[in-house]
Image: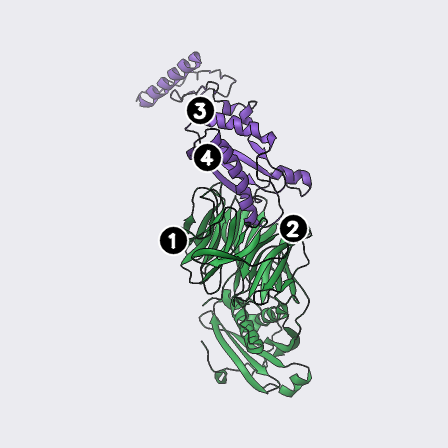
Chain colours: A green, B purple
Amino acid sequence: MKTNFKHVILYAGLSIAATMGSAQAQMRIEISGAGSNQIPVAVAGFANEGVAPHTVSAIIKADLERSGAFKIIDAGVISDVNNVDYSGWKAKGADALVVGTVNAMADGRYDVRYKLYDTVKQSQISNLDKAVTAQFTRLSAHLIADDVYFKLTGVRGAFSTRISYVKQEGRSYQLMIADADGEGEQLALRSNEPIISPSWSPDGTKVAYVSFEQKKPVVYVQNLITRARTVVANEKGNNSAPSWSPAGNKLAVALSKDGHTQVYTVNADGSGLRRVSNSNGIDTEPQFSADGQSIYFTSDRSGGPQIYRMSANGGDAKRVTFSGTYNTSPRISSDGKTLAYISRRDGNFQLYVQDLGSGQETRLSDTTSDESPSFAPNGKYIMYATTAGSRKSLAVVSVDGRVKQRLTTQAGNIKEPTWGPFMQ
Amino acid sequence: MRKISSLALVLTTAAILSACSSTPIKENTPPPVVERPATGQAPAQSDTRTVAPVETKSLDPLDDPKGVLANRSVYFDYDSYSVRADGRPVVENHSAYLAKNKSRQILIQGNTDDRGGSEYNLALGQKRAEAVRRAMTTLGVSESQIEAVSLGKEKPKASGTDEAARAENRRADIVYK
């Protein structure tokens, strides 16, 4: 895919004003706060980008801005992407400059090209060239934003990843898949009964979830591409809380087949069911650690719900949370160092993180009905469900708590968010 | 009914005969005047094969809207998972019915109020359903007739967030399959 920019044909004199994408935003995003060390980046309008259905440079700008890691400097449209005025941009405060072009190809696709310049070192530090169909012009912009984020921060960008969540309008429940910015929403499942706890397979092609369509909670795995649905757990009683092993061959689930809710593992095809937790109370919400060796889960063995860790094969459990009388919904960052969870303090349910090395905990939200945290695959952001006014909406916060976003829709409730993996 | 049916039969026969006959119908024959009954219940006149069903009153006490089995909800206190005194008669009445009617099966659906996470509430609702299940099995209901499940906080009966609504939602419902 990568080609050398020496061969880029220049469209001298072409400077079509960037027009905003015509597709109406499905979600509204409000951003507050900013990162501690914002990198000033000038983002130019891409030459000729009006030919594509989405304005590539506008999507890149929105992605970078939302991350809180950058201060965006508007650079107008730059048509000559090979000869940039380094000192001029440096003087305008930009440490880096993003330029690019979009061209309609003879086969109907769009050739999206970009270059990233370092104005301090006065050199090109990256480039990408993607030939994409109309529907993937948004994706090409997210991939460019990912590249800029990685080249300038050293951390892999997650703008091209996707999220899943449940939209509820009256008695209609819809499992949705959307880009990480809430755009490009697609329906995966519609039901007249609740859907909860979606969980992405590590390859991003399947989602496990709990559906109540049989008047009780049953765990399904749905292939997003083929529509095929597999019942992974439908034992007597409750079947819930699916989460994938990092290898993608197993799931941990919570079942009440023995009379009380306990943690089990099961193969992704529903075979090989095996109980791994062993208490007399509730053990639920299992989550594999990034290395697949441990399972974090919620248990009320000490009275109220607290978070514990055990071997993925079962055995003794170690308590992980000690502050407060109600800690649920554990999620582990991909580097295994940070635990996100919901804690009840003074009657409020709020998002917390704990540094698993030091045990230090930090409250990340100032809302009062938080649920369902999930890490971005790069570990830098946490998405969660919260309540805005009387409606349920989604929020994103950086793990340092400095950058906050809220995603709302025009109607209905959105809940049960889960952030998908990096895609191949 | 009998008169109408006979008339319908005559007319049908006439229609069939006329359709089969190769002799042309006399032009001056006046069309027969038929008086239609006002009720909509009677089958169409040409239809002598549709059967109008009659049902006797059900003797199953489960179907009596005023009977003790009409009450199928057991309520719980906040943060409590044991059957309250006011729920005992509900459990006993349904247990007696199920012990007598071994072919009937039920789901016990536990519910919680809206506070806290979906999954933990699902497990708490299951504890409520389980409390009802245990009480019923001690009263002689077979395990094979009962399944204790939970809807957690996903299907609140009362939508508010005040104490009255929350109390209404801390509940287990008996659902006959």
Do circles 3 and 4 both sit on a common chain? yes
- Please determine whether, in this image, residue B151 is positioned above or below residue B101: below
For this rendering, which residue is in front, A160 or B43? A160
Q: Residue under circle 2? A: A391
In three-dimensional space, the C-alpha distance between marks 1 and 3, rounded to whole angstroms, equals 40 Å
Q: Which residue is drawn at 56% across and 86% down?
A: A123
User: Is label 3 or label 2 in front?
Assistant: 3
User: Is label 2 or label 1 in front?
Assistant: 1
Mark drawn on residue A269: 1
Image coords of residue A196 (percent x, y): 53, 50
Query: Can see residue A110?
Result: yes
Do circles 3 and 2 both sit on a common chain? no
User: Is label 4 or label 1 in front?
Assistant: 4
Q: Residue under circle 4? A: B146
Query: Which residue type carries mark 3?
Result: Lys
Image coords of residue A70 (percent x, y): 64, 74
In three-dimensional space, the C-alpha distance between marks 4 and 2, rounded to whole angstroms, equals 36 Å
Query: Can see residue A416?
Result: no
For this rendering, which residue is in front, A255 or A133? A255
Task: Give whichever of discs 2 and 1 has the lower sequence position.
Answer: 1
Image coords of residue A277 (percent x, y): 46, 52
SS for dot 1: loop
Tag 1 near tag 3, CB within 8 Å = no
For this rendering, which residue is in front, B46 or A17? A17
Q: In this view, does A77 lie to the left or right of B151?
A: right
Q: Which residue is drawn at 55% across and 73% down?
A: A155
Query: Which residue type carries mark 1?
Result: Asp
Image coords of residue A129 (percent x, y): 49, 76
In three-dimensional space, the C-alpha distance between marks 3 and 4, rounded to whole angstroms, equals 14 Å
